[in-house]
Amino acid sequence: MVSLWFGSALLDAGWTDGVRFAVADGRIARIESGVAPTPEDERHAVGLPGVPNVHSHAFQRAMAGLTESAGPGADSFWAWRALMYRFVERLSPEDLEAISAFAFAEMLEAGFTRVGEFHYLHHDRDGTPYGNWGELAARIAAAARESGIGLTLLPVFYAHGNFGGLPPNPSQRRFINDIDGFARLLEASRRAVRDLDAARVGVAPHSLRAVTAAQLTALVALAPTAPLHLHIAEQIKEVSDCIAWCGRRPVDWLLDHQPVDSRWCLVHATHVDHEETHRLAASGAVAGLCPITEANLGDGIFPALEYLDAGGACAVGSDSNVLVSAAEELRVLEYGQRLVHRRRNVLARSAELSTGRRLFEGVVAGGTQALGGDWRGLAVGADADIVSLDLEHDVLQYRRGDALLDSWIFAGRDRMVDCVWRYGRKVVSGGQHIRRDAISARYRSTLQRLLA
């Protein structure tokens, strides 16, 4: 039994002073409030629920900052994708593990405590399956084990190059499976995470352009109770190609052809029209938004205000990991809406709670749902995923309650997260991952081989 005491903590009921968490077997066994610390307690100033990261491609962290030169024509997501494919061709299993461990450690330092790893790199460099179909899934699991992050592994099914079952291009050869091969991969992925604390495995059809309608139905049947994630409507070209294929927009087509419900996470959904926005909100699915990556790639801005006002659930993800920051994902999400609507505090949506509080609680709830959890925040029975803020930080001086969240999200920089507990185990202390030196050294060695 571990006893953690916080001067103030954000519980489901709101900000509460003098909170003690009794943690046993990775979960919160008991919560006391309005109590003084005892000598047995580990004491901290401010406690928050950990933030779920619903969408990550961990290996892309090693590319961060290497795609910021314009090409000969208008630069776009599609030009970035071609560069990413060239980078993928170099990666060995050892490289993937080292890069992923580094990205996961950074996520923990930033306040993310569980990641949905949208894992589509499956085969050897020539496209041949490894002897163990789950070789690279096992590397992701090993990186999660080393870093201590909670893992929802989302093996990706990828079979085609565009809508209508067009053949893939050679640069996609490391991703490609048929349904039988994917079933083997899915079982291998489940074995890979078996010894991880509270790990989950979902299914991720890459996108409507990468699967046929029949394959999508088969994939949903493979995982009748697991999380289902897919990219959708990220780019205008994707929407146009979908209309050319079937006469419908992507989200409309999906909602008409699949039983989309609370197990689904539609990643990006950037280019949805008014009808799609309201239909998606009513479905119970989560919109998985990745504001930093969407800005970096020039994707566009999701209609978050209309969607939330319609009762939709949303979450955030770090996607390409060009910058890993839970606070900045929320900041960019709100600032994008301010630029669109030309006013401030857009997603607060009322004066009852601050903007930071609305954003934070919304993405904790939506992210927990999308990654297969059955609770939200800090409650008895929940995983003991707890983040403490450093109240000695200059930016947090003389703040209380919602002002702490607002200052962290909108006024902070690095090192405002002090400690992080994942499944009751401290993995970040004094703002630094407990294995930072070893993980960083292996990451640097990997980059030397890949880039020097």
Image (cartoon, rainbow, N blue to C red):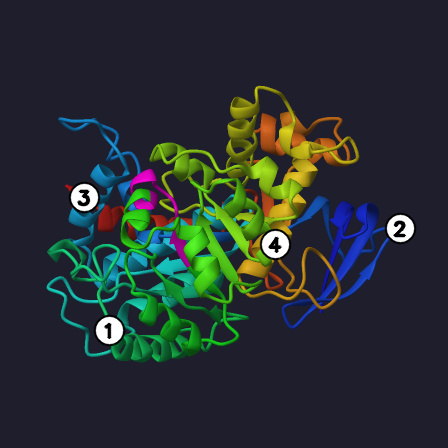
Would residue 34 be visible to someone looking at this image? yes
Q: CA distance from mark 1 to mark 3?
A: 23 Å
Residue underneath mark 2: 34
Which numbered disc flags the more N-terminal residue, 1 or 2? 2
- Does 161 sit left or right of 28 as displayed? left
Which numbered disc flags the more N-terminal residue, 1 or 3? 3
Q: Residues within 10 Å of mark 3 (few under 14, many from 20)?
A: few
Front residue (pair 35, 243)? 243
Name the front one of labels 3 and 4. 4
Name the front one of labels 3 and 2. 3
Which numbered disc flags the more N-terminal residue, 3 or 4? 3
- Does 395 sit left or right of 13 as displayed? left
Q: Is residue 361 above or below residue 375?
A: above
Residue underneath mark 3: 82
Which numbered disc flags the more N-terminal residue, 3 or 2? 2
What percent of the width, then of the height, locates residue 426?
A: 58, 57
Residue underneath mark 1: 178
Q: Amino acid at mark 1?
A: Asp
